[in-house]
Amino acid sequence: MTGVRTQKPLPTPVRLALVALTAAISVWLAIIAVPRNLDKACEAAEWPNLTTCIPPSTDPAQQVLALRERAARNPGDATSYLALAVLAVQPAGIAPLNADAVLATASQLAGENPMLRRVLASRALELGQWPQAVALLARLAHDDRDPVAAQRLASLLTQTESRDAVLQALKPDSQWVTTVMAALPAAKVPIADALPFLSKALALGLIPSEQGLAMVSQLKAAGQWLAAQALWLRLLGQPAPLIYNGGFEQGFLRGGFDWELPELPESRGGVSVRQPVVEGANGRALALAFNGRPLATPVISQTLVLFPGNYQFSSRFSSRQLRAGGGLVWTLTCLPGTAELARSSAITDTANRWLDVSFAVEVPQACGAVQLRLQTLLASDALSGLSGEAFVDDVQLRVR
């Protein structure tokens, strides 16, 4: 690129801006990228319009004067005003500038420049101008794929005023929602603070079901049972019984509070699972075909979020030519931990007849959640493998 002096030291206005930005790191860490990019552009002649670099000086006023002179010689030179904008938003005394005037001119000349958006976002955050900050951060997060902007936008959910601005910015055509959702863990936003955002985004149809279910899985893994269930119910968009999909009429939704199967390929597992229409069942049923190979247990399970109290479990069971050793049992286990609360009597071969299976259970205060499991009565039976077929239908839990 002709006319560019590439061997000079980094320009002092940029170095001063970097020092000031480092001092103001609590405002927004990503802003450091602005002077660094300006440094590199001046040093390596990366920008077409950057035809001169300001000589070093220790006097900020001289740096401002030099930048203004360069801008006067090149009226359309956006880079001069980018450098001035960086200086303008620093603490008072760093540079003698009217920040509003400089930023207004820089916005006219380089309004679509991501670095300017970072500067403007930093100033809006510092001044508590939440709607402006949200709009700028949203563009940086989505349009410019800026991960730090996404995290900063996510962190606004932790304060009432800034959270309200984020919620007001949510529109049916907002495209930045999934980016912010993905940034929630890195921003360390408590789920309680994020729930209003997630709820509104769900109501507007802005969260894909896969991403919503992945978030439910993360909350379950962290033991945030109530928050996970609240998000799950929002995803469903309707009330749900204590045991979801207990009639097995719907395909399983992986990641929510639906039925869970062992993470094994069918070729390596001891059972294949289907949901066919079965004679004697109320429509579809859970069909388990055991093949004699070692069996991962539980065969099937579901996590339940229950208030402390007394409940009645019931289900229907049928089997043919079932060879299951001591048989199969339903159990309810307190989470976290492995304390078993109750279990059914052993279920063995029913000669193709449907039988009712039921038992009572008391859920104590200490249970964050309860896991319902269908498993072998004896661990040795799972190791040796089962054979035959079993069918399950109408799995329910009621308050007593």
Image (cartoon, grey):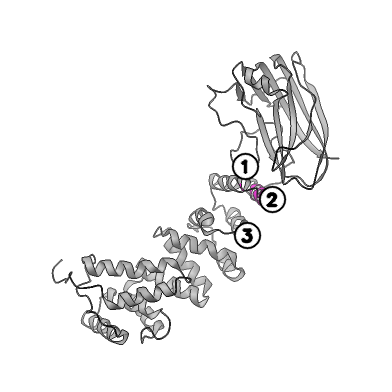
* Residue at x 64%, y 58% (from the top left corner): 192
Q: Position of residue 35 (x, y in %)?
A: 33, 70
CA separation in Å, label 1 and label 2: 13 Å
User: For residue 196, which numbered disc appears in the image?
Assistant: 3
- Determine the main secondary structure of the stretch shown in magenta: helix
* Mark 3 crowd level (few <14, some 14–19, many ≥20, 10 Å Cα): some
Which disc, if any, is residue 14? none
Q: How far apart are labels 3 and 2 at the CA level?
A: 14 Å
Report if the CB atoms under discs 3 and 1 are less than 8 Å apart: no
Position above or below: 22 against 302: below
Image coordinates for residue 319, horizontal then vertical, percent: 72, 17
Quarter placement of the C terminus: top right
Q: Position of 341 compared to 124: left or right?
A: right
Indicate yes or no whether the magenta region holds residue 235.
no
* Viewer-side residue, 95 vs 276: 95
For the magenta stretch, what is the residue range?
222-232
Q: Which residue is mark 2?
A: 226
Identified by mark 3, the residue type is: Pro
Q: Which of marks 2 and 1 precedes in the sequence?
A: 2
Q: Which residue is mark 1?
A: 256
Q: Residue 263: image x %, image y %?
A: 56, 31
Residue at position x 64%, y 45% in the image: 236
Would residue 381 appear left or right of 91 to someone viewing this image? right
Q: Position of residue 48 (x, y in %)?
A: 21, 67
